[in-house]
Image (cartoon, rainbow, N blue to C red):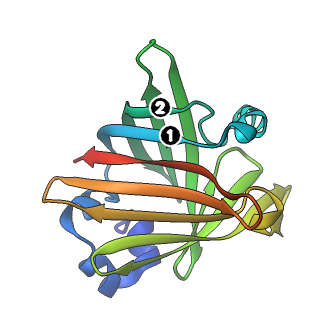
Amino acid sequence: MRTLSLMQQALGPQQWEALPAPLKTHYRLKPHTTHGGLSIAYPRFMSPLLHALRRFGALVNRRGEAVPTAVAKHMADDTQHWRRSIRFADGQEIIFASQWQAEGGNRLTEYVNRHLGLCMAVKVENDTLIYEGCHFVLRVGALKLRLPENLLLGHTHIVERAIDDQNFVMDFRVTHPIFGEVYRYGGKFSI
């Protein structure tokens, strides 16, 4: 029986203890759902690419401000399953599902489908959880090919910070070396 969450494994005991309470709850092992509002923004020129990526299960291809969002998580074997339900004011619901796996050390890979994932390094600094994109992963059978981040969208940077004992804010950004910030989502979530 598993006793440590994927985030606990990646951070190690010292950094896990430095993580604020709402983030520990957000990354706990037991199944749970976190609720909040997600704001999504990207430049107009990204629309065609985001619509194509959405067909592969990646990202959300619609803009919005403080869109009601539920993030449900549960473990199955060595994989953590995330299901983000994003419900827009017009009734459209977008589901962004992914599977997370530990890669050893401080690295986690989030797969948006059976073949495509993003490997990220995690750390805690000043009570803040920080993810830095390392590379994309393309799974072909038993092979895991590494693809540079800049080959696809650009560098991924995620910051999560507690604002009190029950709430945290998160900010996810993708920055391309030529085109600048090409995608962003973030918001406030409650435990």
Residue on which disc 1 sits: 40
Q: Where's residue 1, x and y in %?
A: 39, 62
Residue 132: image quadrant is: bottom right
The residue depicted at 86 percent of the width and 55 percent of the height is: 141
Residue denoted by label 2: 64
Q: Between residue 126 and residue 5, name the one nearer to us.
A: 126
Q: Is residue 56 above or below residue 11?
A: above
Q: Is residue 158 left or right of residue 170?
A: right
State the CA–CA distance, disc 1 to disc 2.
Answer: 5 Å
Visible in this render: residue 50?
no
Specify the label residue 105 is tagged with: none
Q: How dense is the environment of label 2, judged by Cα within 10 Å: few (below 14), some, or many (20 and up)?
A: some
Residue pictured at 64% horizontal, 67% vertical: 119
Q: Pick the residue in front: 37 or 10.
A: 37
Q: Position of residue 168 (x, y in %)?
A: 26, 56
Query: Amino acid type of disc 1?
Result: Ile
Q: Quadrant of residue 145?
A: bottom right
Give the farthest residue toward the left: 165
Disc 1 element? strand
Q: Residue at x 82, y 66 (%)?
A: 147
Q: Name the side, left or right, on which 132 lies relative to 37.
A: right
Label 1 with label 2: CB-CB less than 8 Å: yes
Q: Is residue 69 visible?
A: yes
Q: Position of residue 122 (x, y in %)?
A: 48, 74
Q: Amino acid at mark 2?
A: Gly
Residue displayed at 40% across by 17% down: 89
| Residue 173, image quadrant | bottom right
Left or right: 82 as drawn, with respect to 180: left
Q: Nearer the viewer, residue 90 or 167?
A: 90
